Amino acid sequence: MSFLNTDLTAYKANTFHIAYKYISSAAGTADEWNIDDVYITDGPVTVKTFEQANIKMSVLGSTADGILNLQIESDKNNQFEVTVMDMMGNQILSTSTNVHVGKNRLQFQLPSLSNGIYFVKVSNSELKGILKFTKQ
């Protein structure tokens, strides 16, 4: 199997298209694949991203190891309340954190969670963002 690495830096400020060619000896549709939501970013791969006028936040990677990795990008120093909730709105974790101007990568140790869908809310008196993440 060969891989092609292409430097896309020149296209960073522009919209561009990427084409994929799939070759398979499999017969039928059961062994086929599809591509959904491809993102190219200069930062880490994210599950979801929320962006508001003064804040951008992303859940990074997987929570399989019990750690929630959160990136908060702010245009000013801020203090936020970070709350993790289950699908029923039950609070699982609540803590305060300070962020500085720019990108802030934060880690939160989660209690033992069952596999499923959860929400992380980052808020203060001026801003609020909620992201969904999956524990697998």
Image (cartoon, rainbow, N blue to C red):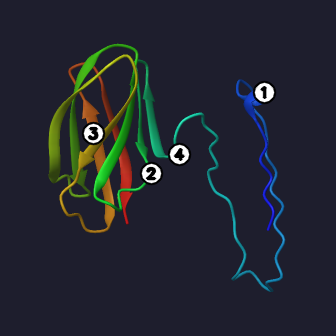
Identity of the amino acid at label 1? Ala
Identity of the amino acid at label 2? Gly
Identify whether 109 is placed above or below 21: above
Residue drawn 18% across the image and 58% down it: 111
Contact (CB < 8 A) between labels 1 and 2?
Answer: no
* Percent coordinates x, y for residue 79 in the rendering: 22, 22
Identify the residue position indicated by label 4 in the image. Answer: 45
* Percent coordinates x, y for residue 23 in the rendering: 84, 71
At numbered mark 3, what does the secondary structure look like: helix, strand or loop? strand
Identify whether 96 is placed above or below 114: above
Residue drawn 80% across the image and 52% down it: 4
Residue drawn 69% across the image and 83% down it: 30
- Give the spatial CA distance, label 4 vs label 1: 20 Å
In depth, the one of 89 and 115 nearer the eye is: 115
Q: Residues within 10 Å of mark 1 (few under 14, many from 20)?
A: few
At numbered mark 4, what does the secondary structure look like: helix, strand or loop? loop
- Give the spatial CA distance, label 4 vs label 2: 6 Å
